[in-house]
Image (tube, rainbow, N blue to C red):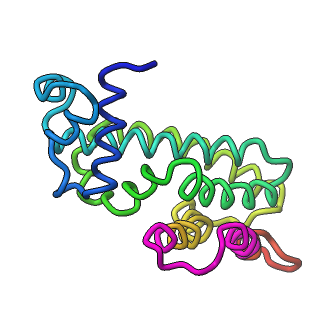
Amino acid sequence: MDTARTRILDSARGAFADRGLIGASIADVSADSRASVGSIYHHFEGKEGLAGAVYVAALRDFQQAFVAAVTRSDSPEDGVRRGVRAVVRWCLRDQSDAARFLLTAADAARGAAGAELGDANREFFATVLAWWDDGVASGDLRALDLDLAHAIWLGPALEYCRLRLDGRARSKPGRAERELADAAWSALGTREGDAS
């Protein structure tokens, strides 16, 4: 659906990705979205509110892609591996502008995201935690708090994506997906005699 709000969000995401939060202006977003400055202020509370809305929209899209990949899995191992691949593909192939924004402007935009951010995170983590708990119950995944599991599982893939988007990674994404998925499974899956 091509609504004014959607056009504004898309234009803002591109402007923020290209020029950063400080460098992009409401006038830039207005020109690109073909929406008046007044219309932008009608939908959002200035540039800060717009940045928060772009952040939440990008985060929700990322979360949906990740949850879809993990919950379609055949096993906990498959889910861990699919989760890593989903991160790399979403960041580098499917939504690179949104990923660049999430990975570089998160601290500045998160404060303006408000209650919608909390809602998105609660839904996401509840779904992932339920999936994780099933894997722990089956004996396939280590019994870790979700924050620690999240850091081990997604932290390396997100850091690789940050480096790649900055042009500082030499490894090709396909190889990175395989290596990072192997590392995540090695760290998160249970091994013989490991009851932790």
Q: Determine the residue located farthest toward the right in the rendered image.
A: 192
Q: Nearer the viewer, residue 152 or 132?
A: 152
- Name the one closer to the observer, 100 or 124: 100
The residues colored magenta run: 162-184
Q: Residue at x 47, y 40 (%)?
A: 60
47 vs 132: above or below? above
Answer left or right for 100 relative to 143.
left
106 to 180, vertically: above or below: above
Quadrant into which the C terminus falls: bottom right
**Apparent side of residue 146 relative to residue 112 in the rendered image (left or right):** right
Decide: is 116 above or below 128. Answer: above
In this view, 165 is above or below 106: below
Quadrant of the image occupied by residue 54: top left
Residue 130 drawn in magenta: no
Q: Is residue 22 left or right of residue 115?
A: left
**Quarter of image, res 80:** bottom right
> 21 and 139: which one is in front?
21
